[in-house]
């Protein structure tokens, strides 16, 4: 462990604050300690809330043009330090350097694009007696809670609209990936007014302290559906506003008219990018029986060309699973598939070597009710499923508590658009996957979420709607 990595501090009221304690952060590629993060005490969270509350009146009164500049300054800081940040992110998250760069620059882009949004004012009445306007005013202090799969861009999904709308923020990264976010906090001191963006890290208690804190007005959470339910319950006590971006079990529906050679590589990465640890990864791939065999062969052939390893090594395309808990969960799903006698097209081996590596694993047409089909695997294990009746496969795609995303692969665009209308998901992609845009609202139906991020709809989630009626003197 280098001495540099031991000095990360939280950012509270614009100052560096050491934790009441510290906890180790591991590199998932080799399980070595790469640094320690501060363990925020309850009193320190109170201090962060007090700092954010103190900063709120001036920040909400700051002209939106200045708040836009603040977002651009965050974008500039992320982009300007991307080399340092990407190395740290790869070390703690495991993803290859190129993907770490995408996470950080994606966060910068999100801040920049969000800075162009406007808070609309609607004139609802304008008569001789009265003028009425509906506006969107900031909520107050936002608690932003991020997961470990895309620590930076998913944090910026929250920070950018929250700040633009005039709120102040307390950001909590996952305890598995806290260091890059802490470092960004250090880099932003002096760039933003003190107390506008506070960054705290800690163990399992810190999230619930945030979601139940009476001084926090809104919680924006990205993580699992299971935790999302707890967040909603905890936020209910003080009726906090909530945005929940939760888990998914996205289906890809591959039609018989696809060009197998053309789509195989895209379909592979739809499932395996970020080692399958993406909320909108393809987690069930339904392939029409006419193209099942050639696509199966093409996926396996492509999988054999992909290099997995330590994300800091040149040429590596897939890193390890991010943490031991998730690693064991994925291994458990593999063991379940083995115990049930499902056929593995590739992968399935486990290793005792250090590092949370699970090889690319594709399972050949397991039953619909198998765990690998029904559960969110969040790892590099894909069930390939054969279908031959469109109504049946659409029914299966929708037969889940999740409703995050889904994709359709076909050379018949109109047919694909018709199927898209039948999918009960927040986003549908046709002949691509995982494209997100700051101009498009993103969110989950059913138990994949509450509310949206991105675009004007996402920005408005950080506001209260306020109508002002003015009775005109002349009347
Ligand atoms: P997680 O739910 O375990 O943790 C997410 C965050 O919540 C972490 O910061 C964690 O420390 C915190 N947390 C844990 N318990 C808490 C509690 N009781 N109260 C408040 N906060 C608490 O999720 P994860 O394992 O970090 O992330 C993987 C999951 O996130 C997957 O299910 C994935 O699909 C989902 N995800 C969803 C989106 C989306 O936009 N819909 C994006 C990425 C990931």
Image: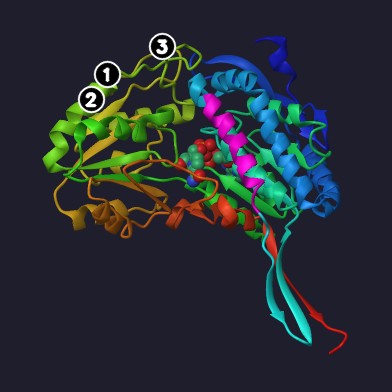
Point out the stretch of residues depicted in magenta. Answer: 100-117
Chief secondary structure of the magenta portion: helix
Q: Quadrant of residue 81?
A: top right
Determine which residue is flagged by label 1: 304
Judge from the rendering whether residue 448 lies leftward or rightward of residue 368; answer left or right. Answer: right
Task: Say if mark 2 contacts mark 1, CB within 8 Å.
Answer: yes
Task: Say if mark 3 contacts mark 2, CB within 8 Å.
Answer: no
Q: Quadrant of the N terminus?
A: top right
Distance (Cα) linking label 3 and label 1: 21 Å
Q: Residue at x 41, y 28 (%)?
A: 275
Q: Nearer the viewer, mark 3 or mark 1?
A: 1
Determine which residue is flagged by label 2: 300
Q: Quadrant of residue 252?
A: top left
Is residue 263 highlighted in magenta?
Answer: no
Q: Residue at x 17, y 27 (%)?
A: 297
- Asked if residue 57 is positioned above or below residue 291 in the image, the reply reads below
Dot 2: element: helix
Is residue 103 highlighted in magenta?
Answer: yes
Determine which residue is flagged by label 3: 353
């Amino acid at each position: 462990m280098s001495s540099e990595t031991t000095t990360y501090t939280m950012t509270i009221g614009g100052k560096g604050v050491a934790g009441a304690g510290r906890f180790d952060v591991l590199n998932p590629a080799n399980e070595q300690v790469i640094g320690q993060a501060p363990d925020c005490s309850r009193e320190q969270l109170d201090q962060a809330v007090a700092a954010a509350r103190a900063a709120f009146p001036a920040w909400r009164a700051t002209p939106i043009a200045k708040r836009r500049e603040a977002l651009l300054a965050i974008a500039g800081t992320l982009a300007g330090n991307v080399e340092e940040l990407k190395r740290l992110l790869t070390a703690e998250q495991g993803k290859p350097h190129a993907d770490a760069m995408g996470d950080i620059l994606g966060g910068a882009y999100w801040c920049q694009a969000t800075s162009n949004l406007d808070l609309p004012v609607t004139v609802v009445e304008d008569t001789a007696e009265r003028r009425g306007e509906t506006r969107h005013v900031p909520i107050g202090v936002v608690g932003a809670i991020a997961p470990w799969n895309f620590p930076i861009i998913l944090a910026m999904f929250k920070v950018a609209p929250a700040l633009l709308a005039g709120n102040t923020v307390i950001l909590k990264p996952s305890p598995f990936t806290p260091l890059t976010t802490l470092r960004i906090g250090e880099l932003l001191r002096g760039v933003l007014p003190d107390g506008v963006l506070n960054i705290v890290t800690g163990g399992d208690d810190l999230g619930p302290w945030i979601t139940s804190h009476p001084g926090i007005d809104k919680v924006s959470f990205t993580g699992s559906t299971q935790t999302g339910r707890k967040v909603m319950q905890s936020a209910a006590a003080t009726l906090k506003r909530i945005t929940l971006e939760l888990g998914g079990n996205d289906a890809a529906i591959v039609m018989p008219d696809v060009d197998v050679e053309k789509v195989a590589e895209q379909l592979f990465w739809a499932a395996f990018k970020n080692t399958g640890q993406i909320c909108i990864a393809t987690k069930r791939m339904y392939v029409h029986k006419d193209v099942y065999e050639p696509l199966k062969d093409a996926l396996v052939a492509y999988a054999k060309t992909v290099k997995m390893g330590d994300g800091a090594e040149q040429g590596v395309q897939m890193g390890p699973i991010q943490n031991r808990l998730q690693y064991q969960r994925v291994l458990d799903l593999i063991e379940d598939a083995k115990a049930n006698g499902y056929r593995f097209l590739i992968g399935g081996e486990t290793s005792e070597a250090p590092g949370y590596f699970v090889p690319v694993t594709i399972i050949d047409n397991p039953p619909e009710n198998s765990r690998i089909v029904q559960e969110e695997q969040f790892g590099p294990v894909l069930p390939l499923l054969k279908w031959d009746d469109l109504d049946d496969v659409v029914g299966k795609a929708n037969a889940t508590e999740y409703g995050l995303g889904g994709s359709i692969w076909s050379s018949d665009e109109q047919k694909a658009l018709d199927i898209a209308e039948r999918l009960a998901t927040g986003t549908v992609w046709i002949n691509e996957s995982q494209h997100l845009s700051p101009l498009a609202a993103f969110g989950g139906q059913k138990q994949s979420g509450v509310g949206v991020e991105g675009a004007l709809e996402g920005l408005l989630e950080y506001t209260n709607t306020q109508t002002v009626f003015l009775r005109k003197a002349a009347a």
